[in-house]
Image: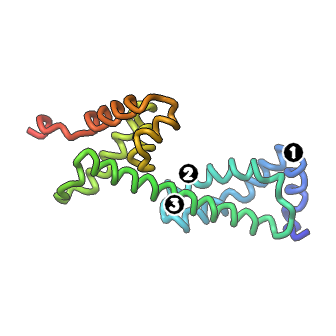
Amino acid sequence: MAIDDADADLVASAVAGDRDAFAALLDRHYDRIHGLAWQMTGSRADADDIAQDVCCILAEKIGHFRGDAKFTTWLCAIVFNACREFGRRRSAFSRFTGRLSQMVGLAANPDGRDLYDAIWIESAIARLKPDLRDTAILVAGQQLTHAEAADILGIAEATVSWRMHEIRRQLAPNPAADD
C-alpha cells in the first residue's frame, strides 16, 4: 500500500467506518483541499463551494480507497475532478442563461449592459417557481422540444407551452419601470 505513513492509520480507520478518523482526515487535509480549489478557480467563494462538495464526495468515496496511490494524491485527484465539474456546471449555466436571455429579448441588441443583464437573468431564473425553472432548463437550457419536456415532466405539451409563455412574461423587461 502507498498510503502516507502519517495518514495510514486514519485512512484505514476511516475506510472501516470510523467517523472520528474521517473527521481527523478532513481536519488534517482541509487546507490542501481548499487551497487547490482556490488555485484552480482563482476565487475564494468558488473554492469554498468546491471544498464543501469535496468533503461530501470524500465521505461517499473513502470506502473505495484502495491505497494504490498516496492518500494525498488520491485526494488531489478528487479535488481536481470536482473543480472541473464545477467549471462545467458553471459553463452550462452560463450558456443556459445566455439562451434564455436571447429568448426573452435581453440579448437581441447588446447595449453595454451585458454584465448587468447576465446578473439579472441569473437572479430572475433563481426566483422562478420550481416548475417554471425546470421547464425553462429543459426547453431553453437543454433545447428540448415542448413534447420532449412534457414527457420528462409528466405533463401535457400544452402545459409546457403555457409555462414557457409564463416564463417569457415574467422575465421580459418592464419598459414602464425604465421611465
Mark toward the start of the polypeptide (2 vs 3): 2
Quadrant (top left, top right, bottom left, bottom right) of the N terminus: bottom right
Residue 18's label in the rendered image is 1
* Residue 88 percent coordinates (x, y): 52, 59
Rendering quarter of residue 82: bottom right
Mark toward the start of the polypeptide (2 vs 1): 1
Quadrant (top left, top right, bottom left, bottom right) of the C terminus: top left
* Residue 62 percent coordinates (x, y): 80, 53
101 left or right of 18?
left
Spatial CA span between label 3 and label 1: 33 Å
Query: In the rendered image, is residue 89 in sight?
Result: yes
What secondary structure is marked by label 3? helix
Q: Residue at x 30, y 32 (%)?
A: 166
162 left or right of 2?
left
Q: Which mark is nearer the camera, 3 or 1?
A: 3
Q: How many residues crowd mark 1 within 10 Å: few (<14), some (14–19), many (20+)?
A: few
Identify residue type, mark 2.
Asp
Query: In the rendered image, is residue 134 in sight?
Result: no
Identify residue type, mark 3.
Gly
Q: Nearer the viewer, residue 177 or 129?
A: 129
What secondary structure is marked by label 1? loop
Q: Which residue is mark 2?
A: 49
Q: Which mark is nearer the camera, 2 or 3?
A: 3
Spatial CA span between label 2 and label 1: 25 Å
Spatial CA span between label 2 and label 3: 12 Å
Residue 100's label in the rendered image is none
- Which residue lies most toward the left here? 179
167 left or right of 57?
left
Q: How many residues crowd mark 2 within 10 Å: few (<14), some (14–19), many (20+)?
A: some
Q: Which residue is mark 3?
A: 87
Q: Residue at x 26, y 44 (%)?
A: 104
* Residue 54 percent coordinates (x, y): 66, 53
